[in-house]
Amino acid sequence: MLAIKLVKMNSLIWRDGWLLSICVGRVFAYANFMVYAACLPILRGQWALSATQAGTVASGFMLGYTVSLVASSLLAERFGSRRIFVLSTVASASTAMAFGFLARDYTSGLVLYTLAALTQGGNYTPAIMLMAERYRPEHRGSAVGWLIASTSIGYAFSLAVSGLLLAWGGYSLAFIGTGLLPVLGAAILWVPLRRAPNTVHDREGTVRPVAVLRKDPNAWRLVAGYTWHCWELLGMWVWAPAFLAASLALSGVASVQAAEVASYLTAAMHLVGAVASSTMGHLSDIVGRRRVLLALAAAGGMLSLTLGWLVHLPLPFLMGLILIYGFVAIGDSPVLSTALTETVGPGSLGSALAIRSLMGFGAGAISPTVFGLALDLAVRSENAAAAVWGPAFMVLAIGGLGATWYAWRFRPHAHRHPTLP
C-alpha cells in the first residue's frame, strides 16, 4: 500500500508541466557545479595543489554559494521569489562562462569559482519559496522533492559531461563545455517563470527570524539539523570523485582514466541522490517528516564512519556502498526544506532560509578544507590508503551524527503554517 501511494504521488511532475519545465531548466543551470570536483584529481597535478589548497577552492565556492543563498533568500522575501529566481539564472549563466574560459591556475580558479557561486543561490532558495507558494502542504514534500532531485540530476549531468570532455580535451575543455550549458538552462527556465506570479508577502507583524528560531524549538532543530546535514553532504560531494580515483589507482588504472571513470561513477551517485530526493520527499508526506529524517541521518552517519576505511574494496562493492551513501546523504534535504516551510510562516520564510543557508552552507564550506587537512596529516604519518581516507571520512561523520541528534529531537506540528487554505 505504501509503495502504491509513493508511485501515485511520484506522478506529480509528469502531471504538472510547469514543475517539469522548472526541473529541466535547473538541470542545465547546475551543469558547472561539479566540474571542479570532477577535474580535481587532474588539477592537483597540473595546478600543483596540496590537498589543503584543493579544499580551499571548494570551500571558496561554498562560501560564495552561502552568501548567494543568504542574499537571494532575503531579496526574494522583499521583492518576490520569482523575480530573484529570474535574475539569478541570467547572472549565474554569465559567471559560469567566465569560469569556463578564464580559470587556468589556482588563483584564477579560486576567484572565478567563488564568483560563479555568488550568483547561483537564487536558483535554490527562491525556488523553494515558489514551491511553498504554489503547492498545498499535502503535496509540498513531493514538489520540493522533485525540485531538489533536479539539482542532483544537474550534478550528475555536470559530472558526466565533465568526464567526457576531460577525456577529449583536458580540464580546460571540461570547464568551457560546462560553462556554456547554464545559458541553455536560463533559456529553458524563462518559459515557466515568465508565467509565474511574483508574490511579495505582507511582512507587517511578522516575527523576526532570529526570534522564531529562539522561540520555536522545532524551527531551531530543523536549522541545526540542516547545518550538520550540509557538513556531511557537501564535504562528501567534493571528495567522492578523488576517493574513487584513488581506489581505481590502487588497482593500476592511469590517473587521467581514473579521474574520467570516477566522474562517471560519481555521476551515478548523484542520479541515485535524485531518486532519493524525489521519493523521500513523497515518503515524508505519507509517514511523517521526523521518521524519514531520523532514518536517513543515522544511516549517513554510519556510512561516513566506515567508508574511508574500505578504499581497497573491489570497485563493484565500493560503488554499491557509495550509491547507498549518496542516497541517504541527500534524501533528508527535501524533508528538511519542506518541514521548515510548515514551521515558519510565509512572511518570515525567506529570512529563515537565509539563516539556515548561512549556517548550513557555511558548515559545508568548511568541511572540504577540514577533510583535505585530515588527508594531508594522514599522508605525513602513514602511507596506507585506508589509514589516509578513513580518518578523513570520519570528519564527515560528525555531520551525520549531529543531524541524527536533531532529527531525534524534532517534534513536528501538523502543517502549522500552510501557505494556502
Image: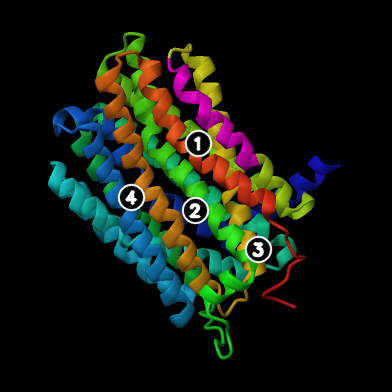
Q: Are marks 1 and 4 in contact (CB under 8 Å)?
A: no
Residue density around tag 4, few if under 14, some if 14–19, many if 20 or more, within 10 Å? many
Q: Where 271 sits versus 88, above or below?
A: above
Say if the magenta span includes residue 69. Answer: no
Which sits earlier in the primary sequence, circle 1 or circle 4?
A: 4
CB of mark 3 within 8 Å of CB of mark 1? Answer: no
The amino acid marked with disc number 3 is Asn
Separation of residues labelled 2 and 1 (CA atoms):
13 Å
Q: Residue at x 80, y 47 (%)?
A: 5
Can you tell which of label 1 and label 4 is closer to the viewer? 1
Quarter of the image containing the C terminus? Answer: bottom right
> Around disc 1, counting alpha carbons within 10 Å, would you say few (fewer than 14), some (14 to 19), or many (20 or more)?
many
Q: Which residue in the structure is indicated by mark 4?
A: 181
Q: Earlier in the sequence, mark 4 or mark 3?
A: 4
Q: Tell me the distance, in whole angstroms, between the alpha carbons under discs 4 and 3.
A: 39 Å
Q: Residues within 10 Å of mark 2 (few under 14, many from 20)?
A: many
User: Along the polypeptide, which appears first: circle 3 or circle 2?
Assistant: 3
Task: Write the start and end of the magenta stretch as one range.
Answer: 296-311
Q: CA distance from mark 3 to mark 2?
A: 14 Å
> Is residue 248 or residue 378 the one in the foreground?
378
Regarding residue 57, the answer to whether it shows in the image is yes
Point out the residue furthest to the right here: 1
| Left or right: 262 in relation to 110 | right
Mark 3 and mark 1: span between their CA atoms?
A: 23 Å
- Compute the Cα span from label 4 to label 2: 30 Å
**Which residue sits at x=43%, y=44%?**
234
Residue 309 position (above or below residue 157): above
Amino acid of disc 4: Leu
Query: In what quadrant of the picture does the N terminus appear?
Result: top right
